[in-house]
């Protein structure tokens, strides 16, 4: 029988017993229809997988026995922050899901000059949904560390606070490839623009803040494709 893997917000330890209730219990009992004796894998974002067995089932809760734990060796050696100018909701969800699967450690939504202001206000209300998408991607991909989802901020505020070892601005009209950049020490930031790209003034401002332009090839990529492509390349060559 397939072992279900599930995120829980509670502190976890091994060995211990834990009562699960609320939405977590509803999902396990009503959706997954777990039974007494069934094995589960739990994680809460602390980097550890916990192995448990269902001891008791109630209508709205269940008791599990955590018997063992392990630290999976699947986190990248390099922390990669994906900063993206807000775009259409379904594309943001795709970026968060696939970016989590690929190993991103942080997502930073930003509001730039060509970000639709009305659209940005609507998207800011989706923070809880976006967090759940990231968690679900961790459940699916086997990650025991949940990437951080920052609150959206202005382009200028972001430039003033980012302190990565390598700051890469994804720009379609630059020729410099990743292999031409020195290997960073601990952290990389990938900065991607909206559908209309960054303005020339924003590109200049980013460069003045330490960002260097990175080319992803001769074709123009969509707003959600560019950061995922760059993330894949960074993970392959640097992590």
Image (spheres, rainbow, N blue to C red):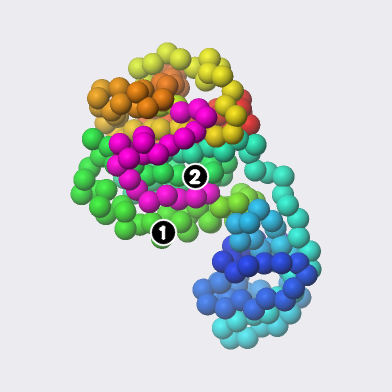
Task: Give the quarter of the image for residue 69.
Answer: bottom right
The answer to which of 183 and 131 lies nearer the viewer is 183
Mark linked to residue 114? none
Q: Residue at x 45, y 32 (%)?
A: 190
Mark linked to residue 129? 1
Mark 1 or mark 2, which is nearer the start of the sequence? 2
Q: Position of residue 147 (x, y in %)?
A: 53, 49
Label 1 environment density (alpha carbons within 10 Å; few <14, some 14–19, many ≥20): few
Residue, far left: 118
Q: Is residue 219 above or below residue 100?
A: above
Circles 2 and 1 in contact, beta carbons < 8 Å: no
Q: Position of residue 3 (x, y in %)?
A: 71, 62
In the displayed structure image, the side of residue 94 where residue 28 appears, left or right: right
Mark linked to residue 106? 2
In the displayed structure image, the side of residue 213 where residue 1 appears, left or right: right
Q: In what element is the residue under mark 1?
A: helix
Tell me the CA gap for discs 2 and 1. 16 Å
Per the rendered image, the range of residues in magenta is 147-167
Q: Is residue 201 above or below residue 131?
A: above
Q: Position of residue 108 (x, y in %)?
A: 41, 44
The answer to which of 221 and 71 lies nearer the viewer is 71
Label 2 environment density (alpha carbons within 10 Å; few <14, some 14–19, many ≥20): some
């Amino acid at each position: 029988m397939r072992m279900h893997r599930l995120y829980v917000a509670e502190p976890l330890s091994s060995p211990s017993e834990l009562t699960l209730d609320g939405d977590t219990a509803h999902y396990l009992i009503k959706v997954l229809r777990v039974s007494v004796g069934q094995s589960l894998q739990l994680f809460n974002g602390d980097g550890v997988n916990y192995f448990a067995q269902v001891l008791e089932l109630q209508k709205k809760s269940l008791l599990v026995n955590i018997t063992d734990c392990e630290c999976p060796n699947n986190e990248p050696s390099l922390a990669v922050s994906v900063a993206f100018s807000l775009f259409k909701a379904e594309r943001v969800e795709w970026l968060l899901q696939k970016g989590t699967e690929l190993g991103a450690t942080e997502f930073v939504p930003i509001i730039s000059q060509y970000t639709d202001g009305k659209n940005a206000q609507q998207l800011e209300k989706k923070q809880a949904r976006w967090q759940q998408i990231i968690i679900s991607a961790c459940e699916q991909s086997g990650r025991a560390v949940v990437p951080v989802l920052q609150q959206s901020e202005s382009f200028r505020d972001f430039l003033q606070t980012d302190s990565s070892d390598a700051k890469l601005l994804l720009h379609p009209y630059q020729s410099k490839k990743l292999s031409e950049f020195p290997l960073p020490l601990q952290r990389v930031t990938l900065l991607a623009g909206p559908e209309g790209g960054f303005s020339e003034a924003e590109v200049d401002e980013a460069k003045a803040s330490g960002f260097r332009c990175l080319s992803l090839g001769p074709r123009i990529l969509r707003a959600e494709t560019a950061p995922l492509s760059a993330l894949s390349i960074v993970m392959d060559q640097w992590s």
